[in-house]
Amino acid sequence: MQHPSYPLTLDLTGRRVVVVGGGPVAARRAAGVVAAGGVVDVIAPWLCEDLLASVQAGDIRWYDRDYVAGDLIEPRAAWLVHTATGSPDVDAQVAREAEAARIWCVRADNGAASSAWTPAVARGASGGPAEGLTVAVSGGGDPRRAAAVRDAVHAALDSGTLPVRRVRTLGKTPQHSAEPTVGRVALVGGGPGADDLVTVRGRALLAAADVVVTDRLGPRGLLKALSTDVEVVDVGKTPGHHPVSQDRINELLVHHARLGKHVVRLKGGDPFVLGRGGEEALYCAEHGIPVEVVPGVTSAVSVPAAAGIPVTHRGITASFVVASAHEGADHVVRAATDAAPDATLVLLMGVTRLGETAAALVRAGRPADTPVALIERGWTPDQRTTTTTLGHAAADAAAAGVTAPAVVVVGEVVSLRAVLGDLAGE
Ligand code: SAH
């Protein structure tokens, strides 16, 4: 073929399509046409089981005989013919007569001699982000190559890695559409920062979002991949500086959902671990907005891991406590004293009040030489870990210039870092 082929999508509804041949290839072709609403006449002296079943179900009509000249135009002209008889002579005859009658002909025996080809097709799963999308792949004479690409596209369609977002008619329900007027909110845990540490479900919801309300932490790189008409609202908090209040964030979520939009609230780590996701879920529920949560990889566990620190380790400790240091040293001390004496303490938001917290823990009985790790910006290219002890934590943090965001780990598990080193892969 000297010229490139010409891809086209057909409306076969109610149109006659002839399938010549009764084997499995003919069966697949017939099924595809029936699924597209075409009226199938199969011409073959025998049928495989699938075709027989379709005949019995009334989906297709069977002419129980060999192909004869004129079958493409009688009793009424076909729009398209598939020939898959297994006999090159018969397929060639069908193709000749199709050509003369200006009917497109797909030949199973000889693609190069066909006037039309069926592509490998991937469709977005119903209910998934790519619902309604059809991708057709033509292999240029190599059906396996087309099928392999189709399979990859298929997997990608529903994964959220492709920009498959549907442009919705917002604010009103289009006629003949099941699209609800009220949108929905998904609280998506983005993980600790690396773009590929978000869940597949979170990624898919992000790809289908109309509005993304995001924090400073989490996989900010994913935002760059969003199409330009997705509204990104940055409510990122930096310590001591709260540009958007929690009340306002709650209102924003409900406001956009009421406009019929699909809202993703993208949060660092897990939405329900010191992330105020519970408040946002409650607020949505109280206002009648459908809300769902997608868990994320919490920094409390994953950031120590990135620095080669398992939060539990056989022979060292079988428990760990996650606490916010933002609430003050008393809160941390209570969490620590309620836990097993060997429990690992994981402190989030712990940089600003590190000196106060460490001193209080020593006063409460944790030995001053308990190992401590301060892991800044975990899972980013700037990850840095400072190891120290409870007694020296404040001074060493100040000397190293440790800043938020950082996870503070207190406990003997920190000593494993000396052997394991950083474990965050690329
Ligand atoms: N919901 C989040 C926690 C939010 S609180 C989660 O599950 O991870 C914010 C705190 O999380 C920060 O102050 C810091 O202590 C910690 N944090 C989050 N991401 C971090 C990262 N990539 N590196 C270091 N600390 C991080």
Image (cartoon, rainbow, N blue to C red):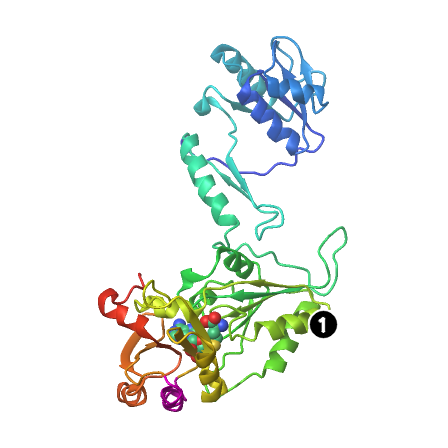
Q: Observer-nearest residue: 222 or 98? A: 222
Residue beneath disc 1: 286
Q: Quadrant of residue 134?
A: top right
Percent coordinates x, y for residue 423 in the rendering: 29, 64
Percent coordinates x, y for residue 191 in the rendering: 45, 66
Callout 1: few (<14), some (14-19), or many (20+) C-alpha neighbours within 10 Å?
few
As drawn, 208 above or below 176: below
Quadrant, the N terminus: top left
Question: What secondary structure predominates along the stretch shown in magenta?
Answer: helix
Determine the quadrant in which ligand 1 lies: bottom left
Q: Observer-nearest residue: 396 or 80? A: 396
Residue at the image position 60 percent from the left and 78 percent from the top: 249
As drawn, 166 above or below 83: below
Q: Residue furthest right?
A: 175
Q: For residue 424, say whether it is visible.
A: yes
As drawn, 63 above or below 423: above
Q: Observer-nearest residue: 261 or 335? A: 335
Residue at the image position 47 percent from the left and 19 percent from the top: 109
Quadrant, the C terminus: bottom left
Name the residue type under label 1: Glu
105 sits to left or right of 283:
left
Q: Is 311 part of what is drawn in magenta?
A: no
Residue at the image position 62 percent from the left and 20 percent from the top: 51
Q: Which residues are magenta?
A: 351-365
Percent coordinates x, y for residue 119 in the rendering: 50, 34
Q: Residue furthest left?
A: 419
Percent coordinates x, y for residue 350 in the rendering: 41, 83
Q: Observer-nearest residue: 242 or 93? A: 242
